[in-house]
Amino acid sequence: MFIAMNRFKIIIGKEKEFENIWKSRETFLDKVPGFKNFNLIKGKTNEEYTLYASHSIWKSEEAFINWTKSEEFRMAHKDAGVNKHLYLGHPEFEGFNKII
Amino acid sequence: MFIAMNRFKIIIGKEKEFENIWKSRETFLDKVPGFKNFNLIKGKTNEEYTLYASHSIWKSEEAFINWTKSEEFRMAHKDAGVNKHLYLGHPEFEGFNKII
């Protein structure tokens, strides 16, 4: 199992706009080989930002990497730059392999 | 749904020792109300450390908080200080609520 997380620091006051973008977003993930599950999750809020993360579970790291090279990935991310005004800094990717 | 993650920076070369501690650890989680799933996951390695995270899924944040106040939590963490020599800095907790 592989967990892929992309961390987003969202400017205070922009949380609902950010959430609504994800709610209306087409991810094209359902038919991707090795894809298991996707969630958008919300972490802490401090003085500067609210932390969010996309959280997806994959059969393997290989399945995830194959997706990042796919047409489905390109389509899901074609509008990514449009929402830069919501972010503090760049999204930060972290990938994790299951040990236990 | 609530995801609780504790991030551990493990000193290079200490990874197997850290993993073995978790493999033999009794977490007492199975009977805790609202507990769904636990994994130990491994992230990137840089020049200083290898990132690991404990990753548990709960029915709600409330269920997680209740667990942190329980006898099961106390028992699962009674030996936590013994392994400090494996860490670079303190573990960092992050909790996330499901949005989508």
Image (tube, coloured by chain):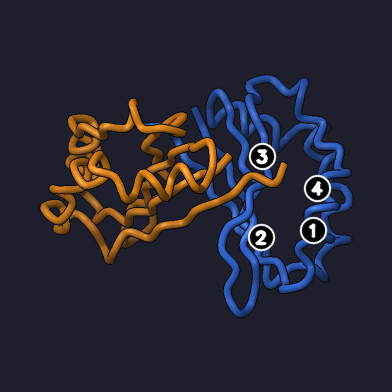
Chain colours: A blue, B orange
Of mark 4 and mark 2, the one earlier in the sequence is 2
Of mark 1 and mark 2, the one earlier in the sequence is 2
* Chain for disc number 4: A
Question: Which of the 4 image quarters holds residue A43?
Answer: bottom right
**Label 1: which residue?**
A18
User: For the residue marked with disc 1, what is the amino acid?
Assistant: Phe
User: For the residue marked with disc 4, what is the amino acid?
Assistant: Trp
Secondary element at image label 1: helix
Of mark 2 and mark 3, the one earlier in the sequence is 2
* Chain for disc number 1: A
User: For the residue marked with disc 2, what is the amino acid?
Assistant: Phe
Residue A52, placed above or below residue A26: below
The residue mark sitting in front, 4 or 2, is 4
Q: Quadrant of the N terminus of chain B?
A: top right
Secondary element at image label 2: strand
* Residue at figure coordinates x 80%, y 60% from the top left: A16
Mark 1 and mark 2 in contact? Answer it, CB < 8 Å.
yes
Of mark 3 and mark 1, the one earlier in the sequence is 1
Residues marked 1 and 2, same chain: yes
The residue mark sitting in front, 1 or 2, is 1
Give the alpha-carbon distance from disc 4 to disc 2, as whole Å.
12 Å
Q: Which mark is residue B52?
A: none
**Label 2: which residue?**
A8
**Label 4: which residue?**
A22
Give the alpha-carbon distance from disc 2 to disc 3, as whole Å.
14 Å
Of mark 3 and mark 4, the one earlier in the sequence is 4
